[in-house]
Amino acid sequence: MILSIVGLDIGYGRKIVQRSLNLQAGSGRLICLVGRNGYGKSTLLRTIAGLQPPLAGEILIDGQDVTKMSDGKRSLLMSLVLTDRIDVDNMTVSDLVALGRYPYTSWNGSLSPEDKEIVADAMRRVNIFHQKDKPINCISDGEKQRAVIAKALSQDTPLVLLDEPTSHLDLSSRIDIMFLLRDLSHTTKKTFVLSTHELDLAIGMADYIWLMQQNGVTTGISEDLLLDGTFRQSLANDNFDFDTDDGHYRIIRPQGTLSAAIVGDIDSDRARWLRCAFRRCGVAENHDSANSVEIDGSRFVFDGRTSERIEDVVDWVCQANSNFIR
């Protein structure tokens, strides 16, 4: 195992956030650390990284105790990507990525030809090489995130820790970064452990989930944690739940007094999205309801009216009860 955590207590001063954690991570894995705020996700990553001391227990990387290492030795075994925004002047992308080679350079920090090739290879792996001469402040947030991941790769450690690597990014960039991390973990055989609030992405991408709860961490693959109800028990609340059919969470809105029946092509995409709209608006689906919506090919039919737009159908159904508020 690349990472072994044995009987670990984490926290600040005398305040213990989590007790007796026992976790393991093998090589070539993407591990997502998820859970509610305040349960210690960032504290765990910072403790593994040596930024704060463990209150009890051991952290072993490649069989070596992190707490007994010098900073130099630790930097050869793990790299860390924090959630802080990057805002530096007069530094290019390649300059930033080259900082990952600092543990290997001589006293004057000069890069050898081998170091330079490692830096270039890291930028190619994350598809940022074409921006290597651009100032950091002149590239997008998504490209900045790729650059700091390349920096971690150039450090060439078996373990890479990332704290909320998709924060500050738009949806497309968040998905791209998660795909990138999954691909890198498999192709480089490095272990990536990241904390995230992106539940859908974690469920769909992670090789392994560490679900941090109030008293401990439950581990497993996403599918097992969905099927045995662990996600639902730990993360769902009155406002959302997990759909065990597809692994996504869905918003729950209390249903009002209005209901509707869906007939016709009830297994079509149109029926599925109509159900989503009804749930969002608090309309209960009831096969015995007097409000019946028929799906006929691309058309919705309700009370003699037809439309191809779900918006119209929702309006018609809601108007069937003048007291109903969407």
Image: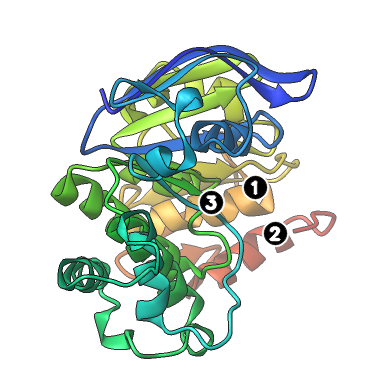
Q: In this view, does 14 lie to the left or right of 313?
A: right
Q: Mark 1 or mark 2: which is in front?
A: 1
Quarter of the figure with the N terminus: top left
What element does badge 1 sit on? loop
Rounded to the nearest angstrom, the CA distance separating label 2 from label 3 is 41 Å
Q: Quadrant of residue 108?
A: bottom left
Cβ atoms at labels 1 and 2 below 8 Å apart:
yes
What amino acid is labelled 1 in the image? Answer: Val
Camera sees residue 126? yes
Rounded to the nearest angstrom, the CA distance separating label 1 from label 3 is 36 Å
What element does badge 2 sit on? helix
The front one of 297 and 34 is: 34
**Would you call the spot at circle 2 few (<14 residues within 10 Å), some (14-19), or many (20 or more)?**
many
**Would you call the spot at circle 3 few (<14 residues within 10 Å), some (14-19), or many (20 or more)?**
many
Q: In this view, does 273 lie to the left or right of 315?
A: left
Camera sees residue 242? no
Quarter of the figure with the C terminus: bottom right
What amino acid is labelled 2 in the image? Answer: Cys
What residue is pinned by disc 2?
318
In the rendered image, the vertical position of residue 204 relative to residue 301, given as above or below: above
Label ID, residue 283: 1
What residue is pinned by disc 3?
164
In the rendered image, the vertical position of residue 182 relative to residue 121, given as above or below: above
Dot 1 or dot 3, earlier in sequence:
3
Q: Residue lying farthest front?
A: 107
Q: Residue at x 17, y 49 (%)?
A: 188
Q: Which residue is drawn at 48% across and 56% down?
A: 165
